[in-house]
Image (tube, coloured by chain):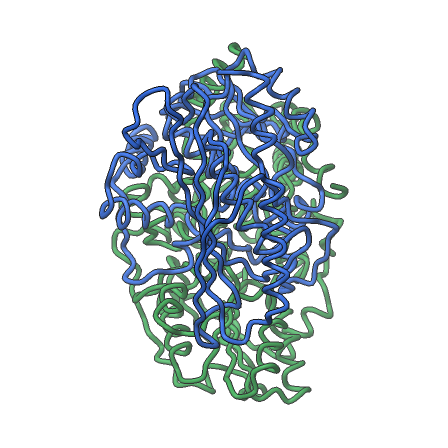
């Protein structure tokens, strides 16, 4: 007779297995930000490209240019945007592409400086829409204090694209002394989110028009450099790591923290800010808001004694009025995210396997 | 959120939890089956078992509509999807279910036009918008989803949408419960009856369970307090020496069901003589097919469906899990060969499946959790 403990050990061994892509072709799940995406990245790309800057697998790579100590280091990041529809309440693919890259730099601890922008356009895409997207990118860049300094344009035949795809890359300067990253996370640290989660993902789902649902919701897309700076100024040295909660949502970020730090994250469901319209839509679809994408929210881990000040600093910022301490880092069980449910129970919050798929009943 | 938060109140849960413990006869172990996959999901999502005494055990039943679809029917659907000019439409949670040769997602990646829809009416809309294509809806589910398929077929027929058909895999709950009750290895004390199915069929069809098998059933809703109250109602029946069908979910479930929904099903569908269930094998008169009158909208008549039969993998014990004979983690391949990333059985694929729910939400023993949260609490 197998004991429960033997099964738990078995699952832990399964979790620690080297990731391997078993499918013969790429499926949509490989792009959804969950386990399938991680497996693809680890098994195909990291294996092929392995180097010290990549191995950290952060939002941005810290580049050692060999200029010696005391010189600010460079951080580089890149991201592609394939959102459909390209215009949605609260934003469009253009400001999303700028904000997303600015945010990857900001949560890496860098001051965003310069961006590139590459466009893959489908034959027939309206020039008027492209002007609108470019204007929106320019406005977002101005807001974030970055310049779009180089780019590229390709056009594919009608039917070979989805209107407009944008890839942005960004560089920023790492000019603060403190180290950031999951390796800095310690048991006892507080886990904060900068605002209500899931607004972007649910807004885009509703904007697709597949569901006969309407809600007064806007994407949360926004540059985070200013609120990140406010947080770091308020508690110098106390911020352990930050990450923006894009595809895969807050749950995926927390799992990366738990696994990377070899610690547990104990999350308090009642403390997680979720707008009623988001939780309502998620309820109807059978989707957990913890897995829904944000584009203007970040998760921060802060030393225990700085948590109150950090929360006050976030809430004092115009983008952080609804910021909250949502959990703590604990030493056990290592590598797992546990949720204390609002109902008074406890459960595991795992990494999503593929896309969050609606349940039928 | 109104009409939701009221059913997730932790204080009320604690109060009910105390009442449940008080009803338990000392030294007695109670084993109740939650028939519906939605119940399993709620139990794990909200950590409901933390509110139950160790002597009240919940086991998972056959009511996950995705879990009971045999692999061969998935392969049949993929064969249809690979026919020229076909668009196969499906609910989201079927997309990752493996057939013998792969899943819908993999077939889509290989070039089949497979699209996710939220309702069969969306599939009909795709058919109207693509008159040059043949649009097939992969219909799955118990009596919960069968009425919407029925209404869609009626609408397609009345509007003459000739390029729309349904690959009908609807199953019915009563034969499945009966198969479980007739199982020689059954050790159950009662049932938490499926709430969604009962909105359509009502409570009356379950009356044979107490009268012929001597097991009580409480028709249960899907919020965590619904389930706790249903457990309380079952235990109260034991305490009072009763054995009957009771309806906890009265805000939604009428005793005699929904006549219009039943009529739509009866108008368009009839019982198949036999249907194979994943893990449970062939069960007589347990599934629905479209009536001859609607042959033009029946994918099994429109297409040359191969009728693939794929034996369940030998190592997979989905059947025992679905019958509540073993807990998911007692299956030989649970957590080793069979994980959410590499599912062998459907119970691990569907988010409503018992194995996926156990793996994703509940694979930690209560003792370890209690210890961990206590330590965290003292630090805070």
Residue A151 in view here? yes
Q: Nearer the viewer, residue A77 or B370?
A: A77
Q: Residue A327: image x %, image y %? A: 55, 24
**Horizontal relation, residue B99 to residue A327: left or right:** left
Q: Residue B260: image x %, image y %? A: 73, 70
**Horizontal relation, residue B260 to residue A137: left or right:** right
Quadrant location, the C terminus of chain B = top right
Q: Residue A170: image x %, image y %? A: 45, 43
Is residue A355 shown above or below A123?
above
Query: What residue sits 31% from the left and 39% below the top?
Result: A54
In the figure, the green chain has which letter? B
Q: Residue B5: image x %, image y %? A: 71, 37
Q: Nearer the viewer, residue A315 or A228?
A: A228
Quadrant location, the N terminus of chain B = top right
Residue B207 in view here? no
Query: What residue sits 40% from the left and 74% below the top?
Result: B112
Q: Colour of chain A?
A: blue
Is residue A286 shown above or below B91?
above
Q: Nearer the viewer, residue B288 or B370?
A: B370
**Horizontal relation, residue B277 to residue B260: left or right:** left
- The mark tally for this picture is 0
């Amino acid at each position: 007779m197998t004991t429960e403990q033997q099964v738990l050990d078995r699952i832990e061994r399964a979790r620690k297995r080297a990731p391997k892509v078993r499918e013969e072709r790429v499926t949509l799940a490989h792009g959804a930000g969950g386990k399938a995406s991680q497996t693809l990245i680890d098994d195909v790309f990291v294996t092929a490209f392995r180097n010290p800057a990549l191995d950290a697998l952060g939002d941005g790579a810290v580049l050692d240019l060999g200029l010696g100590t005391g010189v600010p280091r460079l951080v580089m990041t890149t991201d592609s945007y394939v959102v459909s529809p390209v215009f949605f309440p609260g934003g469009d693919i253009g400001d999303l592409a700028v904000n997303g890259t600015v945010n990857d730099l900001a949560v890496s601890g860098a001051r965003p400086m310069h961006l590139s922008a590459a466009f893959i356009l489908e034959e027939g895409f309206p020039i008027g829409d492209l002007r609108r997207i470019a204007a929106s990118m320019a406005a977002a860049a101005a807001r974030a204090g970055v310049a779009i300094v180089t780019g590229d344009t390709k056009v594919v035949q009608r039917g070979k694209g989805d209107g407009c795809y944008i890839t942005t890359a960004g560089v920023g300067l790492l000019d603060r002394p403190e180290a950031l990253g999951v390796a800095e996370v310690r048991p006892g640290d507080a886990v904060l989110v900068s605002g209500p989660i899931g607004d972007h993902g649910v807004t885009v789902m509703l904007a697709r028009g597949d569901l006969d649902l309407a809600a007064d919701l806007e994407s949360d897309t926004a540059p985070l450099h200013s609120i990140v700076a406010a947080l770091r100024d308020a508690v110098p040295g106390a911020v352990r790591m930050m990450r923006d909660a894009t595809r895969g949502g807050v749950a995926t970020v927390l799992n990366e923290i738990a696994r990377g730090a070899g610690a547990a994250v104990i999350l308090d469901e009642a403390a997680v800010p979720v707008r009623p319209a988001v939780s309502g839509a998620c309820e109807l679809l059978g989707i957990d808001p913890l897995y829904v994408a944000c584009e203007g929210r970040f998760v921060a881990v802060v030393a225990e004694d700085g948590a109150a000040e950090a929360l006050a600093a976030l809430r004092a910022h115009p983008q952080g009025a609804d910021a909250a301490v949502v959990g703590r880092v604990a030493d056990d069980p290592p590598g797992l995210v546990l949720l204390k449910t609002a109902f008074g129970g406890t459960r595991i919050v795992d990494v999503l396997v593929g896309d969050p798929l609606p349940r039928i009943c | 959120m109104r009409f939701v938060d009221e059913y997730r109140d932790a204080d009320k849960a604690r109060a009910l939890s105390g009442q449940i413990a008080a009803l338990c006869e000392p030294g007695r172990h109670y084993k109740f089956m939650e028939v519906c996959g939605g119940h399993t999901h709620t139990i794990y999502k909200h950590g409901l078992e933390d509110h139950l005494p160790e002597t009240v055990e919940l086991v998972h039943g056959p009511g996950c509509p995705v879990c009971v679809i045999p692999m061969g029917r998935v392969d049949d659907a993929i064969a249809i999807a690979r026919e020229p000019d076909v668009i196969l439409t499906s609910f989201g949670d079927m997309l990752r279910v493996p057939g013998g040769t792969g899943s819908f997602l993999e077939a889509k990646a290989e070039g089949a036009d497979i699209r996710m829809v939220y309702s069969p009416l969306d599939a009909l809309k795709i058919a109207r918008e693509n008159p040059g294509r043949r649009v097939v809806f992969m219909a799955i589910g118990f009596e919960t989803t069968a009425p919407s398929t029925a209404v869609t077929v009626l609408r397609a027929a009345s509007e003459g949408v000739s390029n729309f058909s349904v690959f009908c895999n609807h199953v019915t709950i009563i034969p499945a419960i009966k198969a479980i009750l007739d199982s020689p290895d059954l050790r159950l004390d009662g049932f938490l009856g499926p709430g969604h199915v009962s909105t359509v069929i009502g409570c009356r069809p379950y009356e044979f369970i107490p009268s012929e098998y001597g097991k009580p059933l409480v028709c249960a809703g899907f919020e965590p307090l619904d389930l706790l109250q249903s457990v309380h109602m079952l235990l109260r029946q034991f305490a009072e020496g009763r054995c009957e069908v009771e309806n906890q979910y009265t805000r939604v479930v009428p005793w005699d069901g929904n006549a219009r929904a039943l009529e739509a099903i009866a108008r368009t569908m009839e019982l198949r003589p036999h249907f194979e269930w994943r893990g449970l094998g062939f069960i007589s008169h347990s599934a629905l097919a479209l009536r001859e009158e609607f042959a033009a909208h029946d994918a099994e008549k429109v297409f040359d469906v191969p009728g693939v039969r794929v034996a369940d993998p030998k190592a997979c014990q989905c059947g025992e899990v679905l019958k509540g004979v073993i807990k998911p983690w007692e299956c030989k391949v649970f957590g080793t060969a069979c994980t959410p990333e590499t599912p062998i059985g459907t119970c691990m694929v569907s988010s409503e499946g018992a194995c996926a729910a156990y793996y994703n939400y509940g694979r930690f023993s209560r003792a370890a959790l209690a210890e961990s949260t206590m330590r965290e609490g003292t630090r805070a």
